[in-house]
Amino acid sequence: MPTANYRSLLRTPGAAAFFLPASLGRVGIAMTSLSIVWLVHGHTDNFTSAGLVTGAFAVADAVLAPQLARLVDRFGQTRVLPPSLFAHAGAMAVLVILVAADASPALLALGGALAGACVPQLSAMSAARWAALLRADRAGELPTAFALESISNAVSYLVGPTMVSALAAAGHPVFGTVLATSLSVVGGLVLAAQHRSAPPPAVRVTARDAREDRSLLRRDVFLLMGMNLALGVFFGAMQVSVTAFVVERGVPGAAGPVFALSSCSGLLAGWLYGLRRWSVVASTQLLATTGVLMCGTLLLVSVDSPWQLAAVVVLTGATIPPLLVLFSSLTESAVHQSVLTQAFSWLGSAGAAGTAAAAAASGWASDSLGSRGGFAVAAVATAAMTLQSVMGLRLLRAPEDRPGQAESTTR
């Protein structure tokens, strides 16, 4: 089977026109949460308030993102995205005004929640466009497209937070917030203007079989959400535990390079993974990848030096993009195209919930047992992912193996 090529994928009519603005908007979204931290802390000199506002932002985003995605699937991206972008921009402006006015922590948290409630779901929308563009006669290239999405997300979360931190260090935290919002809105508006590549809105149906076909209340969807929840726990635990580890060893400055090394490893692995058409079925790939991640995380419990830590995070970081691609591919296979944006958003919300829960759990474990306690939380999460991937060998199958599913994904 021929090797997939990112360049030829982007040369598909309409592909670059939606992928590039979505990528620009994702940089803004990647900046937003950290920009709120710097904004609130820069004015209040209080990390407690900053954490409260950022937490309210994250919770509102996780809870309401699938509801916004449901509207997108029902009425179409081009109708729902512009008003949500303007609502997000208005909410961010309100938050800046509240901070400048020395509002109470409760009002600041409310402002953060309003901003999080209407975050544009550009990643889910871009992935849904790839599915609509390629599903009919180029379905074999969907993993490559999802790998491209994964690379774009990784780059966004490398570039965005760096830009925000640089602006904040220069004494301009408000500029970071304004830039984050501007990139999100501009990228989103250009994406919304690409009418030809937008998936068509869902058509109302009344037949019982069609309702069941479009339902997200499925065991395979719940399994994928559970795996994303566990992956979120891994992310949250690693953020706390790596920081605790380098502080224990007296080298707090090593945290940045370690995280950067993990991200670069993931970027390379994601790029290489997407270049190849894999003959091994996705569920088997999932089991192998989660197994490698679990083994790497178990090694973290025994590392004794920053060098050993860096070597292990190269291994664990390399597994993340393939996992994200497999989650996207299996989700696209599992659900009807009319609810695909919702499905992608639910996976993101599950991951966000896991990250939030793990931050508290691994923080307590690190305080009580040292950094190894935090790494143990990550190890438990990856073990749960591996167990779920074993269940997925039977439950997660390709579209052609599902009675009636191949037809439903091409309607």
Image: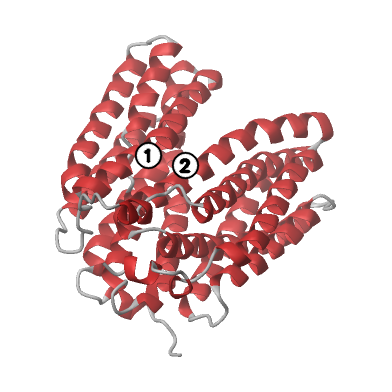
Query: Which residue shows up at 24% across the image and 49% down it?
Result: 206
In the rendered image of this protein, does residue 265 appear above or below residue 29? below
Residue with the mark numbered 2 = 349
Residue 334 x %, y %: 44, 61
Mark 2 surroundings within 10 Å by alpha-carbon count, few (fewer than 14), some (14 through 19), many (20 or more): many
Packing grade of label 1 (10 A; few <14, some 14-19, many >=20) is: many
Residue 225 seen = yes
Mark 2–mark 1 Cα distance, whole angstroms, equals 7 Å
* Residue placed most toward the observer, 241 or 352: 352
Q: Secondary structure at mark 1?
A: helix
Q: Position of residue 195 (x, y in %)?
A: 14, 58
| Residue 357: numbered disc | none
- Looking at the rendered structure, the kind of residue marked 1 is Ala
* Residue drawn at 57 percent across, 60 percent down: 320
Residue underneath mark 1: 65
- The answer to whether 99 appears left or right of 317 in the picture is left
What is the x, y in percent for residue 295? Answer: 76, 61
Badge count: 2
Which quarter of the rendering shows the C terminus?
A: bottom left
Q: Residue at x 47, y 78 (%)?
A: 275
Q: Pick whichever, 187 or 213, lies toward us.
A: 213
Asked if marks 2 and 1 touch (Cβ < 8 Å), the reply is yes
Q: Is residue 251 visible?
A: no
Q: In the figure, 254 relative to 38: above or below?
A: below
Q: Quadrant of residue 408?
A: bottom left
- Where residue 60 appears, as percent x and y from the top left, is 41, 30
Which of marks 1 and 2 precedes in the sequence? 1
Q: Which residue is situated farthest in the front direction here? A: 208
| Residue 243 vs residue 331, the one in the foreground | 331
